[in-house]
């Protein structure tokens, strides 16, 4: 996986057991986060944590192809039950047919009108079903929502997307296994997993930008991928900003921010401090 990225992230969030909050990955249309997402998946699997991936923008096959390039057989991991996939684009079509007075949360949880209680095959219900067994066994896991900005193009209100994200965050919350803290290799913190949310930032799309800002307020870690301000470069593909918030710090504390330039290679993502690219020095 992307070793330099993993090292930079671990320097911000500490050990894997601390990685139990909400992680936001934002990007622009010209800075694809696909490799970063697969790197998150690979790192989670390498530490023995299963992954639930909700696809909202790219297909499962897209990530399998990237995984193959990085030496990670995601289809095999899926067959072994280490990776579960929820096809959000197909499942969320039901939300568009729902009454306009129902939010995403109302349409995907048990708090619905009686006539809609029979609608079980919605995205949130299947996400809950996918992670339920892991929670019951006290097993840490990773839940990835890719890409929630796609909801906006479907006509879903920004407020409802935020509620949906909070619902998914609750799924990675307190472990329900009464003895999980005593099980070797099991969940030892108040949370059973981490939630990774992907958003798209566009210059002239206020809704998309406000969505990212709203989620960033709840994130313990924000990874922002942006193009170079001076334009495209053959040796530097973009800039990466990692902002980490200390959950134990008072609300007025500022985040710890690191700035990098990056270059994507076939099987790697090189990070270096701005102005220190080997091709510049």
Image (spheres, helix red, strand yellow):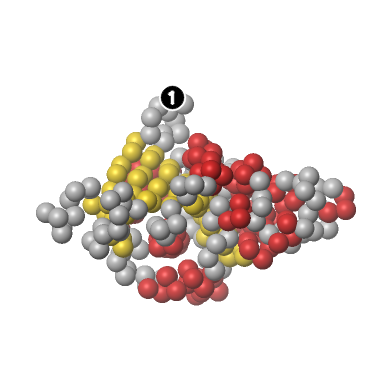
Q: Which quarter of the rendered picture does the N terminus lie within?
A: bottom left
Q: Residue at x 45, y 34 (%)?
A: 247
- The residue under label 1 is 252
The residue drawn where x is 47% and y is 68% is 63
User: From the viewer's perspective, is residue 243 above or below residue 121?
Assistant: above
- Which x, y percent locates residue 170? 61, 44
Q: Position of residue 158 (x, y in %)?
A: 62, 44
Relative side of 31 to 168, left or right: left
Q: Is residue 128 visible?
A: no
**Do we see residue 142 in this rendering?**
yes
Give the vertical position of 149 relative to 57 (above or below).
above
Q: Nearer the viewer, residue 52 or 219?
A: 219
Occupied quadrant, residue 134: bottom right
Residue 22 position within the rendered picture, expressed as x and y whole percent measured from the top left: 50, 44
- Residue farthest toward the left in the current orientation of the protein: 281
Q: Is residue 172 left or right of residue 120?
A: left
* Left or right of 235 in this view: 44: right
Residue 199 percent across, percent down from the top left: 50, 51
Q: Residue at x 61, y 55 (%)?
A: 153
Q: Residues within 10 Å of mark 1 (few under 14, many from 20)?
A: few
Q: Is residue 240 above or below residue 54?
A: above
**In the rendered picture of this protein, how many numbered marks are placed on residues?**
1
Displayed quadrant of residue 270: bottom left
Q: Nearer the viewer, residue 128 or 184?
A: 128
- Residue 261 or residue 6, whichever sits in front: 261
Q: What's the residue at 58%, 60% (across, down)?
A: 56
């Amino acid at each position: 996986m992307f070793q330099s990225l993993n090292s930079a992230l671990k320097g911000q969030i500490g050990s894997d057991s601390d990685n139990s909050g909400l992680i936001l990955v934002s990007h622009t249309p010209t800075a694809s986060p696909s490799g970063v997402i697969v790197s998150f998946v690979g790192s989670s699997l390498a530490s023995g944590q299963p992954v639930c991936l909700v696809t909202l923008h790219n297909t499962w096959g897209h990530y399998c192809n990237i995984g193959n390039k990085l030496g990670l057989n995601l289809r095999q991991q899926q067959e072994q039950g280490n990776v579960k996939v929820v096809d959000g684009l197909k499942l969320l079509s039901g939300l568009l047919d729902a009454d306009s007075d129902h939010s995403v949360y109302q349409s995907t949880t048990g708090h619905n009108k009686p006539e809609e209680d029979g609608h079980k095959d919605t995205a949130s219900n299947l996400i809950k079903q996918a992670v339920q067994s892991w929670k019951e066994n006290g097993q840490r896991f990773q839940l990835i929502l890719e890409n929630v900005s796609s909801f906006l193009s479907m006509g879903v209100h920004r407020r409802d997307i935020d509620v949906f994200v909070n619902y998914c965050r609750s799924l990675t919350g307190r472990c329900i296994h009464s003895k999980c803290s005593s099980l070797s290799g099991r969940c030892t913190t108040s949370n059973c997993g981490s939630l990774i949310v992907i958003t798209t930032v566009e210059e002239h799309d206020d809704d998309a930008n406000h969505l990212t800002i709203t989620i960033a307020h709840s994130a313990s870690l924000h990874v922002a991928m942006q193009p170079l301000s001076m334009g495209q470069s053959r040796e530097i593909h973009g800039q990466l900003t990692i902002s980490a918030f200390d959950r134990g710090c008072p609300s007025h504390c500022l985040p710890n921010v690191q700035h990098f330039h990056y270059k994507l290679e076939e099987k790697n993502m090189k990070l270096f401090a701005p102005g220190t690219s080997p091709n510049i020095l």
